[in-house]
Amino acid sequence: MAKRTRARVWITAAAVLVAAVALLLVHPGGASSAESVVIQVGAPGSSEACSPCHPTLGRSRNPNVIYDHAAHLLVRCDVCHSTSVHEGGQTDVPEMRVCFTCHGVQHGPTGLLASGECIDCHPANFELRPSTHVEDWKGEPHAVASAGGVNDCMMCHSAPEDCDACHVEQQVDVGPMPIVYLSTLPAAAADSTVTIDPTAPVTMSQCVYCHPDIDDFAVEGLIFGHGPHLERAYQCEACHPEFPHGPDEVQRPSMGSCYRCHGLEHGAQGQVADEACELCHTEDFELVPDTHTVDFMSGEHKDPALADPAQCAQCHTADLCVDCHNGGVEMANGETSEPVIPKDHTKPQWSSEHGPLYLSGDGLCGACHDSASCQRCHQTPMPHPPTWMADHAKQKDTLADDCAVCHQDRESCQECHHESVRSAALIQENCVRCHEEMATEPETAIKVAGLAEHAVHFDVVEPDKRGEPYYCEDCHIGFGSVGVRVMSTATGPHDMRLCYECHGALDLQNVRIAPWPGSELCLRCHTDLNI
């Protein structure tokens, strides 16, 4: 077979025109295409479809070709990629006939559009002979193959030298072969409606077009299947809060996201998913991270542990920390550990201060304390079981002091406990059932400011309601954190702005709504203010 070195010519002017248009038109969108959001994965190639995943398109990674997209930037993408580039988990590589649309073509006075030499596009070790050209190809096999047309043969063969001379010698009853290769431009496929939006929540429909077998991947040391998770109807975005494919890498879920279910005890339902290492990691996987050096395990883990305690808790329980932090344990460097007790734990007020810190997450209580250690002091199960909101009412007043250790701000309690009286009248009988001290006479002697404020209004009649008492909802939009009560450094426990909407204020008839304006209202309770 003679190597094709001479330039080919096109026969029709229409073909020349199509190639010229393809070369001169820059693909719409250009550099701005990187800003596109929706990706047309089923449509012909375009910068809009490729740039979200491939911000830079350089040399081909195919070892059998020498190709660089940079040399083809003036050619529209869909000239070569007339069909979807990725489909069914496969990448569609343009056929060689697409290359010969330009390579080796003599374009009038412009000259050769692109080189037609084999060595310019294939490495030296590439086998130029196609695999279809079996050992006896010159006989019947090539005759059968050519029945569908011989134009593709002319990409490599020179008809007078490679075909006609042999046909005459073998006395084959065929006419002369075409003297030139007729370059053809494949028609672009119609736009598909298959789209992917990387900014939308991740769904299976965004993945299956490119990954028909969603588990056909391999991550060293990992055992994972989407099937068991899909069977439980988990939403993809539960593990993939962001689109899995970024411009530079695949965004895989961290192990921390796995522990939101694995090892989690869900009340009476039991463990949501097993946390055994061997269920998700292969036998040869090194479970100890390479960051866990001797120095790290002998003390340098302090700062990373404080910065991200949840990371440590994926593998370590409180017992492991306590054993070493209590002192007397040989560490990785051979030294004996010293007791590690936070300084604030030694203060007398610690027992009354630690509750709010625990609730706010400011302390790393779980590093040393488990439920059993908490319950040596607390009657309340710690942490509270999932059914606690319903069950704690059965305890009545026996746990009041225990609750107050953590729940010092009772607004969250009030939101629920006052639900049944949200529309109740502000009268004594509705309040003393839970707050016996509100029956104190006079009301100004009640020590709890909030209760005193309410009690002094028991016998007050709301004028706009024809002699009826005030109702809770007259002042409270809600209870607790969404109510009208405001704590501030300026007013202390009282927000007097609400009080003065009535006390000392005048109605439309210029009549005072309620007595005791200004400081007179304060002196009703605070007789020692000297004002």
Image (cartoon, rainbow, N blue to C red):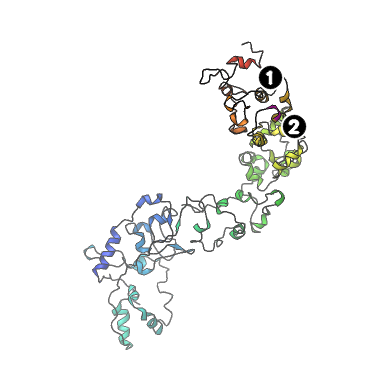
Q: How many marks?
A: 2
Residue farthest toward the left in the current orientation of the protein: 109
Q: Badge 2 is on which residue?
A: 401
Front-lying residue, 389 or 142:
389
Q: Residue at x 31, y 85 (%)?
A: 174
Secondary structure of the residue carrying tag 1 is helix
Q: Is residue 148 magenta?
A: no
Name the residue type under label 1.
Thr
For mark 1, does the 10 Å Cα neighbourhood hold few (<14), some (14 to 19), or many (20 or more) residues?
A: some
Depth check, front residue: 324 or 56: 56
Q: Quadrant of the N terminus?
A: bottom left
User: Is 507 left or right of 259, judged from the image as shown?
Assistant: left
Look at 62% across and 30% down and name the residue there. 471
Q: Is residue 425 magenta?
A: yes
Q: CA distance from mark 1 to mark 2?
A: 25 Å
Q: Is residue 168 above or below residue 57?
A: below
Magenta part mainly helix, strand or loop?
loop
